[in-house]
Image: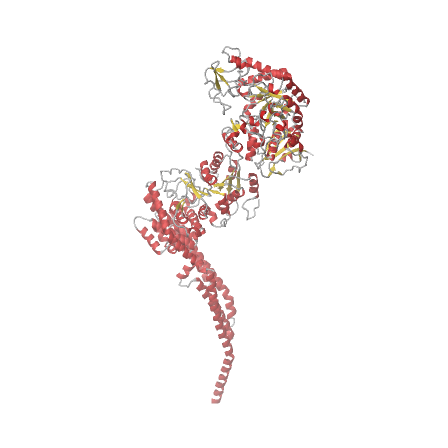
Amino acid sequence: MFQMIADAINQAGVNFVDALVRLLPRMVTTITIIAVGWLIAIFLRGVVRITLGWFKVGPRVERVGLAASLKASGLPPAESLAGSIVFWLVWIGFLISGIDVLGFASLQGLVSEFAAFVPRLIVAIVIFVIGVVTANFVWRAALLAAVNSHAPSPRLLSGAAWWLILLVAGAMALEQIGVAQTIVMTAFAIAFGSLMLALAIAFGIGAGGVARRIVEHAFREPDRPDPDEVSHL
Amino acid sequence: MTDDPLWYKDAIVYQLHVKSFADSDGDGMGDFRGLTTRLDYIRDLGVDTIWILPMYPSPFRDDGYDIADYTAIHPSYGTLDDFRAFLDAAHARGLKVITELVLNHTSDQHQWFKEARRSRDDPKRDWYVWSDTDEKYAGVRIIFVDTERSNWTWDPDSKQYYWHRFFSHQPDLNYDNPAVREEMWLAMKFWLDLGVDGFRVDAVPYLIEREGTSCENLPETHDVLKFLRRRLDEHCTGKMLLAEANQWPEDVRHYFGDGDEFHMAFHFPLMPRMFMALKLEDRKPLVDIVERTPAIPDTCQWGIFLRNHDELTLEMVSETERAYMYDEYAREPGARINVGIRRRLAPLLEGDRRRIELMNGLLMSMPGSPIIYYGDEIGMGDNIYLGDRNGVRTPMQWTGGWNAGFSSADPERLAQPLISNPLYGYQAVNVDSQRRFEHSLLNWTSRLIKVRRSSHVFSRGSTTFLHPANHRVLAFLRTLEAEQVLVVCNLSSTAQAVELDLRHLAGMLPIEMFGRSVFPRIGELPYMLTLGSYDFFWFRLRRL
Amino acid sequence: MRVPETSVLSDDLVRDLMAVGQVDVLVGVPTLNNAGTVTSVVRAVSAAFDQYFPRDRTLLLNSDGGSTDGTPDLVRGIRHDAGTVTVSHRLRTEHRISAPYHGLPGKGSALRQILTVADLTQARAVAVLDADVTTVTPEWIAALVRPVRDQQYDYVAPIYARHPTDGLLISQIVRPLMRAAYGWEVREPLAVEFGCSTRFLTHCLGQDIWTSELARYGMDLWITGEALSAGFRSCQAPLGQRLAPSSPDRPGFPDVFAQVVGSVFGCLDVHAAYWLSRTGSDPLPVVGAEFAAPSEPPVVDAARLTQTLATDLRELQDVLKTILRPETLAALNEAVAGDRLDYTDALWVATVGEFLIAHHRGIMSRDHITRALVPLYLGRVRSFLSQYSAAAPADVDAALESLCLEFERMKPGVVAAWRETVKR
């Protein structure tokens, strides 16, 4: 009996060593891939940062208000962020490729799934970034238009515009990467609809006078002088 | 010589001064015998009528316009027989002759005035216009502004003022007096019976004076003129009266009456506008005045000219136009006299052959009978330092030799000095040398006259202006029944392109009249022409 | 007629110009639906040609932006009042062309067409008028053309007879800013009417400005700036009172403000190489007698001016924080906090200067930057009028002169900040 156990243990040990011996080259390969990938990712991060710096992306990003949004979100500046995104995308790619080499069944197909996922992720990021930029622009434009036309609650109006656009962009981005699509779309529809309804009610009831004045101004007879008119030119 | 009673409508007139044309007896002054020897030249030029400046006895204080005897010839010009011989010789060459009739005034040396000023009771007293004061007819303009201060002059002999619209030595006749009218008719009859074909009647607007008026163009003046015309028509046919009335076209129109006053009248306002249009390089002044010219009776004709023995008058222009003309054509103050410019054609155009040709081309194609001033056909110059308007009345330049072939007298004896500068002097500008080469101005003018004569459309046709967008191009149609001539002139010193709207003439062929070249057929599209500097075309339009 | 994109002149216009030939005086009148006012302008030009330029070859060019109210037909159809030959005789053919312009909508394209035609016709002097003005007289044209034609000036800016409190946008921003920058005391830098020489217009045509954004609304200012910065001999000519009826289609004030102030800032961008090194200011010669300014100020109730600066500041804090320096924003907040708004010259000048720098740096949409200035400007106007609406004109003039000097004092700071931007 002891011999059987010893034999079994021996066999297990041999099998283990066999497996280990078979695994070792693959582990070395994996580690190599991951290490090289890390180096490439760092290199690419640097390239991206330098390239974006060379094209003066920073000031342009600042101009469209994205820089402020990034800062407010605790994120690094645009060039660094872009470099980091590139770094992580590349390195994760190499990571998954390396893990795939190990040949673990449960991890098979991970690479192809990742490869399929990355473009959608990029698109989602782009959509969201565009959304943020647009939201910032519209927020500022709405704020200024409201202030200059003496509309009530300019910040509320412009803020609402900002949130609306961000909501849309966020929903589109999430849909793009396929996260809880149904819930996201439904929640978006409810939120968007409610917001519009709330705004309409607020404006119609709370600012009816303003609404009337705006309409009157649009259709007023040209020769009646505007009492606030000063000779500017 | 034509028997057509309306011969003057087709006439091309050559105006000359006997004094300056040709001297036969070496006294330094031209005469009728000398003139007679030059009639072939005049005939060969292509003209058919001669107009001679006053040839009457005169103290010559106004170059013969101060007449001392209406029915005689000035001794310096010859005798009455010399005049008859000249007249016959002219007629033999098919040339009509018109002389001057100075109706408005006489010389103060005329026997009538001498008698009139003898006493207030003299029968001739009422032949002139007298006044105790010089305040009558106040406000009437002075014509010779450079020399006269008033239209009245005091006669110390008869102790009254006498009226004169011109020089003080030219007292105005009183046409309210029937005797004056009758006497002037007799003077006319004298020359008509000799064979003269007509009269250029000087200073017609001023015959009658009335208080509170401008004393010009009064209805009574027209009555006088109609009277003289009536007597003329009763006496003979085929004669012509040409009015010198320096007025706006609508005022001159009255001098034609209903065909019962003058046969012809000078179109004074047209002349400065031709020069103006050329300088402005814009047809506007010319087109405006012609379009403004009223229609005249069918038996009447306008007399058109570029220059004459007087100054280039600027009376019938606006102040703006006058100032412009002075600035552009008379920069030298000495060139200005009275209200005009005392220069000949060539110096006015700076001796530019192309401009001289263009102006002559206009003269020969505009509506009216053209009058050429002697010497302009060879491009004679002038002398503004000679005083009055004598600078444009210098001796004709026949040759480059002794006294330009005008006279055998000593040069110092000449009544008028010759033009002798290198540019216009007789050595450079004379008939003989211009006869020698085919393309001289003289020969060119002859050819121009010949082409003009080739069609009555120029003399009797209607005139319709085209109005192309290019204002530097003057274009008009002359039409007489079925005959049509298109005249196109470039008033600019630079080459021009012009598109003419000739749709209503579609299908016709323009044939250039000087060289008979055929131009492209007129179609529905705008007719494009290009013209060189100061170029002009005459196209006969034919349907072939 | 299809026009290649690079052609400024259509074939029809070229054909018309062939007929016109060389020109001595050209008057350009850009139009867009000005049927109500263009007749008086055209008649004034026609009368000016008669009275003041009877011997000159003249051309009136109407550059039209696609009017739908029959403006071009009106322009072509206005008859010259011939009168009688003895009274007034026009020497030359009157040329009047109405042609549509092509290119970017806006005055820039109209001006480009006018200047191109002037160049082609070798015009010795050019005047540009506004078709909106009802007070144009023949003397305006003479005043703009004569200094060019007779005294060899290259550029003539107008001077309008107006009360010092009239035209506040000009007196509070445009004039002092342009004066401080370009170093010339131009009273009306936004010269809607102006005169110029062939030399200057040829120079302008050679600049790469005609398809830029500035060409839409800022050409009047650019032309003034270009004349001053490129060293062309310039002067000012008094024209008289300028009245233009307000059109029902006119844009709202914030739009007008953005156009004008955006154009001023844009011009300063274009001409930076010149004004950054220019110091002080010199008077610009005035050719002609000045008109007495109206003694009555424009009717305005300063108290009724919308008192919203405090509220507006609150609303715009986030935006203003990005544009203004902290101390300027703080001073502004303090100024509105009190009972009486006192928007001092120094504070106003600092405001404008920092907005200029922000605009130049493009820290956000430039249109947003200029629109953010609107409530501050209105506050400044209210503050100014509360002090000077009832003051004597001489006192107002003195205050405006003082403002100009304040702008000049600010200039070194602006120059330093500008240059820092360039280094970045």
Residue B323: x and y in percent read 50, 31
Residue B217: x and y in percent read 53, 21
Residue C35: x and y in percent read 48, 38
Q: Is residue B288 visible?
A: no
Q: Is residue B81 visible?
A: yes
Colouring scheme applied when the structure was drawn: secondary structure
Which quadrant is home to the N terminus of chain B? top right
Q: Quadrant of residue B262?
A: top right
**Which residue is at 55% across, 47% downward?**
C7
- In this view, the residue farthest toward the left is C339
Give the total of numbered labels. 0
Residue C244: x and y in percent read 43, 40
- Say above or below: C162 vs B259: below
Q: Nearer the viewer, residue B50 or B207?
A: B50
Image side of residue B425 versus residue A5, left or right? right
Q: Nearer the viewer, residue C324 or C111?
A: C111
Image side of residue C412 versus residue B478, left or right? left
- Say above or below: C373 vs B325: below
Which quadrant is home to the C terminus of chain B? top right
- In this view, the residue farthest toward the right is B544
- Say above or below: C176 vs A79: above
Q: Nearer the viewer, residue B12 or C359?
A: B12
